Amino acid sequence: MKALDRRGFLAVCSRAGVGSALLPGVLYALAAQAQGEQKPAALAKITPELVDAAAALAGVTLTAEQKKLMLEGLEDQRGSYAAIRELKLANSVAPAFVFDPLPTGAVVETGRRAPRWSEAGAEAMPAIVEDLAFRTVRELAELVRTRKVTSVALTRMYLERLKRYDAKLHFVISLTEERALAQARAADEEIAAGLYRGPLHGIPWGAKDLLAVKGYPTTWGAGGFEKQSFDEDATVVERLDAAGAVLVAKFTLGALAMGDKWFGGRTRNPWNPEQGSSGSSAGSASAVAAGCVGFAIGSETLGSISSPSTRCGDTGLRPTFGFVPRTGAMALSWTMDKLGPICRCVEDCAMVLTAIHGPDGRDLAAREAAFNWDAEMDWKRLRIGYLKSEFEPVKAFKPDEAAQGESPEDKKKRETRNAEGAAGHARRAYDQRYDLAAIEKLRGMGVELIPVELPKLPYGAMVPLLTAEAAAAFDELTMTGRDALLTEQGADDWPNAFRVARFYPAVEYIQANRARTVAIRELSKLFEQVDVIVTPTSGEQLVATNLTGHPALILPNGLRGDDAPRPPKIDDGNNDDIGGPGTPVSLTFLGGHYKDAELCAFGRAYQEGTGFHLVHPRV
């Protein structure tokens, strides 16, 4: 018997007059489920009952005659799906379309200028090299450039710290020690000979382990992939090599870029090791915060730079979609994945983005656009907006009331739900004081804040685009049953999400992308009114701007006081505001497409005015 075929099913549905509405993948998924553990040759026969079930999920009604026509066509077409699967498509093979976040008529600056860094101070070398652990890249670079410290000394120091603190924080998957020391020795020789490549030359860094590095495993943080390797370096790795940076480690990520739990355990928050570091750029954020690397590369599809930067008190830059090529990086969502730096300060992020941005001829979504950093840019000429409604008082919490005839079990669930809701409300209300303090600080800097609001659109309804693409990227994992090797198997984890995504209609995927076009157009209009938008890091903007491809800069915004609500006993990984006393909070600045340099210039001014980035955890 031939294998089931989604595209053939779509074609037959079209002939039956229902192609515009019926979920093309549902019938395949139902038939595959019906076959259980049987081999593909014994796939369950497509019956009118299966068609009825698929139609119910798709929300359409079919006549008996339509079903009869569909059954005949489906039997003829079901072989094509197996033919596609026989190609054994690698995760690196992108679909035959390219997402562009720019609205119609947008103009992108392409002329590149030499970066203008801030003035370097006369950095003094401390007596102990480890006292440099928490210095910024800008500070380390000056010490390396003037040969007050060698790259080898820095590299050995960070490698030692990585080994020491990994037992507590679990942020390393692979140390690249041999490679790193060779790079460091080469950097010292070049600098001594007068060949200085720039501010990243000789600076140790770490890569999220979804970036391929030749000669080392690239595990994607997932069980079953522990020994996976690729015979090439990711473009970002190549570019940082070219800049003279020294790769010291490959850092943890939640399995297949979800959360902070990976096949070796859970990566921890240096400010409170009882909690996770959030994810999925878990190890990158934790190691930077713990002073175990000069900077790191993370990735974000829907919060994976923002969330761990918030938990760990780092400065994270999620660049405009298309600024940084993703060649050699694990694909989760071809239309939403973005690579970016996690650092200790904004200018460090600018230094890294300068080195890694621009097309590589392989990632077709990577655009020719300029990132022209100017540390002396007059940020006061920028128009600054803020999401006014996000800074209004948190609404009072209303507990669920008992229903008539409530059972003891339902009562217990309701009381638990109310207790969690009240605790969450208390945390949000407490943290908002930091958001409001940021608004006052900005006004004190002479910023005239312009109130704006996100366009009213169903952003959450567009998120299934991500899971549909992710399910395609890991189709073989689901169909072979290897998803059972992944550590997390709950309702919200990838194995179940991939299965659910198989029931997402192709037509609805296209409709959601059309809605996304509207979101891009409407949200981009905000950046005709303002240049930068100030917002809390969490909330609807996080979903909206990941869908529209706008850049975001996440900054540490202070530490919670001793009066902060106590954290829950169990960190379920769902919220970034549970840290409790002595843990960091964050603030986010948003920018227009490919206006990342202006965004960073303003963010640097705020950061210099507050100094929150200078505080680090006592690891």
Image (tube, rainbow, N blue to C red):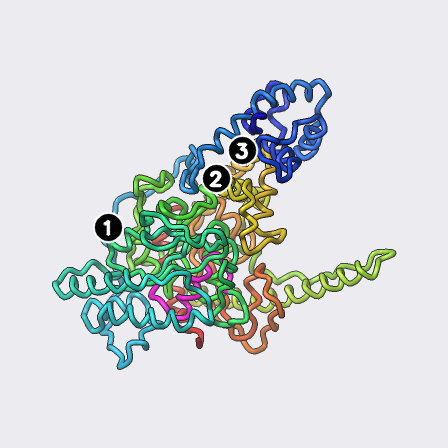
Q: Amino acid at mark 2?
A: Arg
Name the residue beneath numbered marker 1: 113
Q: In the image, which disc is placed on residue 510?
A: 3
Q: Secondary structure at mark 3?
A: helix
| 3 or 2: tag closer to the N-terminus | 3
Residue visible at 64% across and 33% down? 31
Q: Residue sitting at 58 percent across and 41 percent down?
A: 501
Image location of residue 599, percent across then percent down:
38, 55
Q: Label 3 vs label 2: CA separation?
A: 17 Å
Amino acid type assigned to the residue bearing label 3 in the image: Ile
| Nearer to us in this view, 542 or 27 | 27
Q: Residues within 10 Å of mark 3 (few under 14, many from 20)?
A: few
**Camera-nearest residue between 194 and 72:** 72
Provide the secondary structure element on which disc 2 rests: helix
Quadrant where the C terminus sits is bottom left
Return the residue at label 2: 521
Establish if 67 lies above or below 540. above
Which comes before the other along the chain, label 2 or label 1?
Answer: 1
The outermost residue toward the bottom is 127
Q: Amino acid at mark 1?
A: Arg
- Per the rendered image, the range of residues in magenta is 277-296
Residue drawn at point x = 28 percent, y = 80 percent:
128
- On the question of residue 525 being in view, the answer is no
Q: Nearer the viewer, mark 3 or mark 1?
A: 3
User: Sequence order check: which comes first, mark 3 or mark 1?
Assistant: 1
Report the front residue among 166 and 245: 166
Say the numbered circle drawn on residue 273: none
